[in-house]
């Protein structure tokens, strides 16, 4: 068996083709993506309850769809079932749905930087099937020749590509390359948003963030008083606040009550986020959230196996739709994601606002203990990123 290395790095949905399946063809796959996001996050979060988690489920789903393009039989079926995709729907309809979703998400939006890239690094010994190459073109995935028998050169080539496409944000992404690798699929997403209402840096103060009952760390806490969609979900044991970006994106913060993190995570895994979002109502509050930067690197092989994607990792894998040799299997699935939350926005400096303050002080929503964060494209209701921040300083 020859090894197929699938490297997943943040990525948005798949790219546009000339035949995108109609303006609303992506809608049937959105509930599936939402379910997959919940299942994936629940599995990753349960691996180590005391660590930060940050990932892009749409990135992982999209890269797996690239893999599914060349999969057949049980291997293909497991990928689709693991992604919670409708087994009764035709693969072509699903692929067109991903393509159309990419088109909608890739529309130019003011004050938002959203870039996506797909690439296949192909060993010189591997002859990709023409049909698979044509499918990759539909998803704007470029094929790049590489010699994996020279692992250091291959590693440098991949790392230089990732560094360039992420504008220098990610360096030395791949630390080693197995010389038996014949194909590496790289998927990238980079997002930078501008708050609709920016935070005044002068209001940022160092405050305690309670990592657990016995540990507190000092973090720069941003503060702003204004109107935000909020839900106080007493029965569910959490508060939810939506902080909008310009360009139809939002960061959704979920603040579990003391001792309720696991319950809230399990509810998220069962799809409660959509229900909770419907309960949001505009309210004037004093919002305090930490300024932080978090990076996580996740080996997803065991997680995906728990979601039912198993055969692709075995000698029984059928990836015969990729190359003439046909004897391929997935050896590794790695996902890296980073997030930075701060006061700034690209258009913030020129904005002046005058607000009339009520005489009654607004309620305070303070994020000073472990919390969940979701970045959502409100045009499509698709989750771009999902995270659990246990310690903003790690």
Image (tube, rainbow, N blue to C red):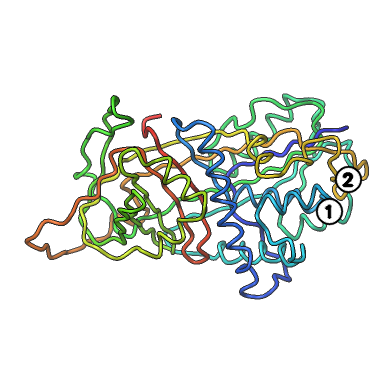
Q: Which residue is mark 1?
A: 132
The picture quadrant where one finds residue 250 is bottom left
Q: Is residue 352 above or below residue 18?
A: above
Q: Quadrant of residue 185?
A: top right
Q: Which mark is residue 323?
A: 2
Quadrant for the N terminus in the image: top right
The local secondary structure at tag 2 comes to loop
* Image quadrant where residue 183 sits: top right
**Above or below, 265 relative to 87:** above
Q: Residues within 10 Å of mark 2 (few under 14, many from 20)?
A: some
Please name the residue shown 30% across and 59% down the image: 230
Depth check, front residue: 96 or 38: 38
Position of the C terminus, as image quadrant, is: top left
Could you say where residue 80 lies in the image, as x and y percent from the top left? 72, 54
Q: Position of residue 114 (x, y in %)?
A: 52, 55
x, y (%) of residue 208? 24, 33
The residue positioned 29% from the left and 58% from the top of the image is 197
Chain-order first, disc 1 or disc 2: 1
CA gap, disc 1 and disc 2: 8 Å
């Amino acid at each position: 068996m020859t090894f197929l290395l699938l490297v997943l790095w943040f990525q948005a949905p798949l790219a546009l083709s000339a035949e995108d399946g109609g303006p609303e063809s992506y809608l049937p796959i959105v509930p599936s993506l939402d379910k997959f996001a919940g299942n994936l996050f629940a599995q990753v979060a349960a691996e180590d309850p005391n660590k930060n988690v940050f990932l892009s489920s749409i990135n992982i789903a999209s890269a797996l769809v690239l893999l599914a393009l060349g999969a057949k039989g049980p291997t293909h079926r497991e990928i689709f079932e693991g992604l919670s995709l409708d087994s009764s729907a035709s693969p072509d309809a699903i692929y067109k749905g991903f393509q159309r979703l990419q088109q909608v998400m890739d529309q130019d939006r003011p004050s938002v930087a959203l870039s996506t890239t797909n690439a296949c690094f192909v060993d010189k010994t591997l002859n990709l099937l023409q049909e698979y190459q044509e499918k990759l073109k539909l998803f704007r995935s470029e094929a790049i020749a590489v010699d994996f028998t020279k692992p250091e050169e291959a590693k440098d080539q991949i790392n230089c590509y990732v560094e360039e496409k992420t504008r220098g944000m990610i360096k030395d992404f791949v630390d080693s390359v197995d010389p038996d690798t014949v194909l590496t699929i790289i998927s990238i997403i980079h997002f930078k948003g501008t708050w609709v209402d920016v935070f005044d840096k002068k209001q940022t103060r160092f405050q305690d963030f309670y990592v657990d009952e016995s540990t507190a760390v000092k973090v720069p806490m941003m503060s702003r008083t204004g109107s935000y969609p909020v839900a106080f979900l007493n029965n569910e044991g959490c508060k939810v606040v939506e902080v909008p970006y310009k360009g139809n994106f939002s960061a959704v913060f979920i603040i579990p009550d003391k001792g309720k993190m696991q319950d809230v995570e399990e509810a998220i895994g069962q799809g409660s986020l959509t229900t909770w979002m419907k309960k949001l109502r505009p309210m004037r509050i004093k919002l305090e959230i930490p300024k932080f930067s978090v990076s996580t690197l996740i080996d997803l092989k065991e997680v995906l196996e728990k979601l039912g994607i198993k055969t692709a990792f075995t000698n029984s894998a059928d990836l015969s739709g990729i190359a003439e040799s046909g004897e391929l299997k997935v050896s590794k699935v790695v996902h890296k994601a980073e997030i930075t939350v701060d006061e700034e926005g690209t258009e913030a400096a020129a904005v002046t606002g005058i607000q009339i303050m009520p005489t009654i002080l607004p309620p305070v929503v303070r994020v000073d203990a472990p919390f969940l964060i979701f970045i959502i494209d409100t045009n499509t209701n698709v989750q771009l990123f999902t995270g659990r921040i246990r310690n903003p300083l790690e």
